C-alpha cells in the first residue's frame, strides 16, 4: 500500500534551512572561484585594500608561499641577483603548492626589477628584464626610480603585445613577442590564446590581468610625478619613503611614522595625484594605523605585517578568504 510521507512543519523548516544554507555557501564559494586571474584586481574592483609580503627563492620557496596570508607577493630582484631561472622555478612551485585559500591558482606575483626609470635610454637598456619577468608568468611589475615620464611610457610598452590597441593614441605599439606566452599561460592556468588576450595592463584594459606600478622614490621623480602618473597603463604608485628620505638627506630610511616632514609631504602629494588619476596608492600599514591609512586612501598595504592585514580586512568587512 502506498503511503504519503507526512513531514512535520518543524522538520520541513529545518530541511529548507539546511538546503538554503548549503546553497548560500556554495554561491559564496562560486563568487570567489577565480573570476579573475589576478586576485588583487578582483579585490580592488570590489573596493577592498590589498596587502603584500615579499620573497626571493626557487621551487621550494614557491610551494611554501602558495598558501600565503598575503594577497600578493613581491619577488624582489631589485637588490637580489637577477635570476629568471629562479623566478620560473618559484612560479612552478606556486602552482604545485596551490591553490590559494581564496581559490585562486596562485597569489598575485609582482616582480621588482633593477631597471631604473631615470630616462628613456637607461630604461631601454634594461627593458629586456620586463620581457623576461612576464614570460615567467608574473602578474605585475614595479618600476624603480620613475623619474622620467618617457621611461614610464617605455615601461608600459615593454609589458604589452603589439596587437593591443587600447591607449594607442598616447602609447607606442607593445613589444612583447611570440613565445613569451607559453610558460606564462601554464602558470595562469589558461590556454595560450587566452593568455595573449588577457596579458594586458589593467585598468587601461578592463580585461587585462597585469598591474604596473611606479616608485616615485626621490626628489626628481617627485617633480615629474604628475606627468608620469598621467601615462596610461599605470595601476598603482608609491612614494618610496625610505629612498625618498635618503634623497632628502636622511640616513635612517624610515617607512613608518614618524617620517621626515618632506617625506610625509611627498606621500600626501602622490596620494592626491593617485586619487585624481584613479590610480591606487601604496603605503606602509601597521596594526595601530591600518584603519587610519585606509580612511586616508591607502589601497595597497605595505609593511609585510599579517596582523595589520587582518585588522584591515576586518575593518573593511572583506568577504574573500585570505
Image (cartoon, helix red, strand yellow):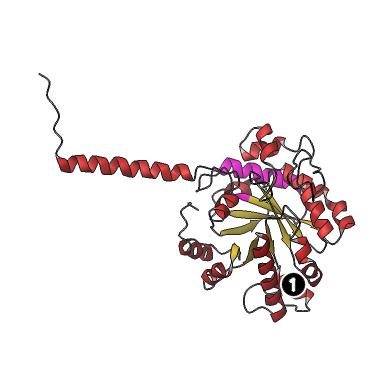
Q: Which residue, as the protein is rendered here, is positioned at the far left? A: 1
Q: Where is residue 296 in the image (x, y as percent from the top left)?
A: 58, 70
Q: Which residue, as the protein is rendered here, is positioned at the far right? A: 121
Quadrant containing the N terminus in the rendered view: top left
Q: Quadrant of residue 267?
A: bottom right
Label 1 sits on residue: 244
For residue 65, above or below residue 117: above
The residue at 59%/45% (across/down) is 106
What residue range appears in magenta?
A: 80-108
Magenta-drawn stretch contains 82: yes
Relative to residue 275, is residue 13 drawn left or right? left
Name the foreground residue: 23 vs 170. 170
Q: Where is residue 300 in the image (x, y as percent from the top left)?
A: 61, 61
Q: Where is residue 221 in the image (x, y as percent from the top left)?
A: 79, 67
For residue 29, above or below residue 143: above
Q: Position of residue 117 (x, y in %)?
A: 81, 59
| Element class at badge 1 | helix
The residue at 66%/51% (across/down) is 203
Q: From this viewpoint, is residue 306 visible?
A: yes
The residue at 67%/55% (across/down) is 235
Name the foreground residue: 125 vs 269. 269
Q: From this viewpoint, is residue 286 visible?
A: no
Magenta-drawn stretch contains 58: no
Amino acid at each position: 500500500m502506498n503511503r504519503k510521507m507526512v513531514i512535520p512543519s518543524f522538520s520541513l523548516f529545518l530541511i529548507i534551512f539546511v538546503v538554503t544554507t548549503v546553497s548560500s555557501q556554495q554561491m559564496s564559494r562560486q563568487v570567489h572561484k577565480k573570476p579573475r586571474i589576478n586576485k588583487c584586481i578582483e579585490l580592488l574592483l570590489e573596493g577592498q585594500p590589498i596587502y603584500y609580503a615579499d620573497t626571493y627563492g626557487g621551487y621550494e620557496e614557491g610551494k611554501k608561499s602558495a598558501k600565503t596570508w598575503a594577497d600578493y607577493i613581491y619577488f624582489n630582484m631589485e637588490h637580489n641577483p637577477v635570476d629568471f631561472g629562479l623566478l620560473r622555478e618559484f612560479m612552478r612551485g606556486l602552482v604545485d603548492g596551490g591553490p590559494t585559500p581564496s581559490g585562486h591558482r596562485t597569489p598575485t606575483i609582482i616582480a621588482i626589477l633593477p631597471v631604473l626609470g631615470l630616462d628613456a635610454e637607461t630604461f631601454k637598456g634594461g627593458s629586456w628584464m620586463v620581457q623576461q619577468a612576464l614570460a615567467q608568468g608574473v602578474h605585475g611589475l614595479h618600476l624603480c626610480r620613475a623619474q622620467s615620464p618617457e621611461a614610464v611610457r617605455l615601461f608600459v610598452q615593454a609589458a604589452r603585445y603589439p596587437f593591443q590597441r587600447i591607449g594607442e593614441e598616447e602609447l607606442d605599439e607593445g613589444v612583447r613577442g611570440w613565445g613569451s606566452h607559453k610558460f606564462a599561460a601554464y602558470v595562469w592556468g589558461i590556454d595560450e590564446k587566452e593568455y595573449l588576450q588577457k596579458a594586458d595592463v589593467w585598468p587601461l584594459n578592463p580585461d587585462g590581468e597585469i598591474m604596473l606600478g611606479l616608485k616615485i622614490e626621490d626628489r626628481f621623480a617627485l617633480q615629474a610625478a604628475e606627468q608620469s602618473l598621467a601615462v596610461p597603463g599605470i595601476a598603482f604608485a608609491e612614494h618610496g619613503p625610505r629612498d625618498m628620505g635618503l634623497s632628502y638627506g636622511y640616513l635612517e630610511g624610515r617607512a613608518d611614522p614618524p617620517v621626515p616632514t618632506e617625506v610625509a609631504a611627498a606621500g600626501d602629494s602622490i596620494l592626491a595625484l593617485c586619487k585624481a588619476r584613479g590610480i591606487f596608492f601604496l603605503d606602509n600599514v601597521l596594526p595601530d594605523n591600518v584603519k587610519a591609512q585606509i580612511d586616508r586612501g591607502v589601497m595597497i598595504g605595505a609593511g609585510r605585517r599579517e596582523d595589520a592585514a587582518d585588522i584591515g580586512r576586518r575593518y573593511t568587512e572583506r568577504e574573500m578568504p585570505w
